[in-house]
Amino acid sequence: MVLAGGLGGSRLALALAETIDPGELTIVGNVGDDVEILGLHVSPDLDTILYTLTGRLDEAKGWGRAGETWNTLETVAELGGESWFRLGDFDLGVHLVRTEALRRGEPLSAVTARIARALGLEPTLLPATDERLRTWLATPAGELPFQEWFVARGHRDGVDGVRFEGGEAARPAPGVIEALEAADLIAIAPSNPFVSVGPILAVAGIREALEGRAVPAVAVSPLIGGEAVRGPAGRMLAHLRGGTGPQHVTDCYKGLIDALVIDEADADAEAGVRTIVTRTLMEDAEGRRRVAEAVLESVAALR
Amino acid sequence: MVLAGGLGGSRLALALAETIDPGELTIVGNVGDDVEILGLHVSPDLDTILYTLTGRLDEAKGWGRAGETWNTLETVAELGGESWFRLGDFDLGVHLVRTEALRRGEPLSAVTARIARALGLEPTLLPATDERLRTWLATPAGELPFQEWFVARGHRDGVDGVRFEGGEAARPAPGVIEALEAADLIAIAPSNPFVSVGPILAVAGIREALEGRAVPAVAVSPLIGGEAVRGPAGRMLAHLRGGTGPQHVTDCYKGLIDALVIDEADADAEAGVRTIVTRTLMEDAEGRRRVAEAVLESVAALR
């Protein structure tokens, strides 16, 4: 099973789904960056995983759907409505169906399963929790909700701390703990440790289940040569952990991992945990295969 | 001012807006066919008026927006969601903005005014009421909500009666009674008397204001040669009023009108009220001008 944020998470999930039996894979997705836009419940990380693993992702942008159109948002902007969060027309259908289901009282995990089935997703996709959990960032500009920091302000504000609203109260969604306990291996995706994996670990019981794991757990570092492939992970590691080497990634997952898959460019740096060195960029099927095999080999070696 | 349903209503409203100072025109629109689809509040008649008078209507279909795309609904259908009611992508922007505003507590009249301003509508568009009012049809298949009868079942079921849920409790939206009292003329559009104009007259106070009018009121008959231009009005008049002549239209507006604009094809039939004969089809600007002038002349003659 894999704990996954957005793009990095979906890439590793795809890599594993292409390498092992996809029906055997469970993906636990981050919901800390879920957001209400125009009255719709948007789950960006779950959707990136859904779109990536069913061949619908806009690969060039790294989010949203391929061949997307933007006509609804054009009207919304014309009417002075909220248009900073880019919701495409095809994409909106998911948000409408999800929001209506949630409003009827269907849990997020249940509607996610329905949407996943309809889109043809083979692995099991579970939100970390069915309850409300929201990531907030402490910045010099004040505390900001995740999407305001990430999208509206382009994550330009430095982050002094991360808070998970609802994290302590949130229970794992049905199946999450069971999947952690039944897994042959637990992988943590090369997503941002603070804002993508962090909110998953903030759910009461998930961190504890990972700490008490009976099988190897391995994280894939989001860094290549001390820099994040994408997004603010590098800057956050430097500021919040004091550096951007493998060790600083390991520090984020203390007691939670047995190995770290790192890139060749970081092979000489201290990691503080057993490492597996490969090329970690997952730009194509070949790159994904390499990383999936590194994860699987590390687990075999650890057993 | 004009009391207007959907397409016929929007055509007469456009005809008048093209003939008099549009800033002087108030349109009171039907909300009895409003419907919740996918959690969105849809006001089809208000939107047909908005789109018609701002040049956005799909003229060929007679509803929705020109150049529309259907990608959101394609996703919804893929997910097994409600897709029988055709919501286009551009159109959805209006429903999202409206629904969010209503959920925040903004009255329908206020959000309608905001949307109208943003789309560049010159006349004043008022919903008959800000409160919930819904049209139900008694049919051999049972009592059906308006859109289920009209769209989902293609108005194939005969109508034995019409009921306006919430009609007795609903108060006129702010400005409606004032507009009726301040008007130089009151026109009733060639919309379906039962399901388009009927719900407006069902709002407590609107019928009374019309009965106590100080200025002439004139209706435009929806019939040409004893048949409705479009939709089920002819069949409903035959079944509920016993025929499809001008007299049967007049019967729908007893005590409410001083004259009826009828088509040349119906010129020889009894009307039971003063008639103005013209060609009533409003297929183009010339047709609209003809009908607007007939309305204005009838009022001048009645004064």
Image: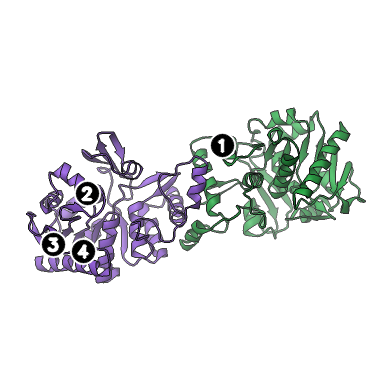
Chain colours: A green, B purple
User: In percent of the image, x 71 and y 44: which residue is there?
Assistant: A14
Residue sitting nearer the eye, B58 or A95: B58
User: Which chain does the numbered disc 4 sit on?
Assistant: B
Reading the image, the residue beneath label 1 is: A114
> Can you tell which of label 4 and label 3 is closer to the viewer?
3
**Residue B101 % position (x, y):** 44, 52
For marks 4 and 3, the one nearer the N-term is 4
Query: Residue B264 bears which disc, if any?
Result: 3
Q: Which mark is residue B233?
A: 2
Residue A6 location (% of width, % of height):
68, 48
Label 1 environment density (alpha carbons within 10 Å; few <14, some 14–19, many ≥20) = some
Q: Residue at x 64, y 35 (%)?
A: A169
Circles 2 and 1 on the same subunit: no
Q: Give the number of the disc on residue B183.
A: 4
- Which three-letter amino acid code belongs to the residue tagged 3? Glu
Separation of marks 1 and 3 at Cα, in angstroms: 58 Å
| Comes first in the chain, label 4 or label 2 | 4
Amino acid under label 2?
A: Ala
Q: Residues within 10 Å of mark 4 (few under 14, many from 20)?
A: many
Same chain for mark 3 and mark 2? The answer is: yes
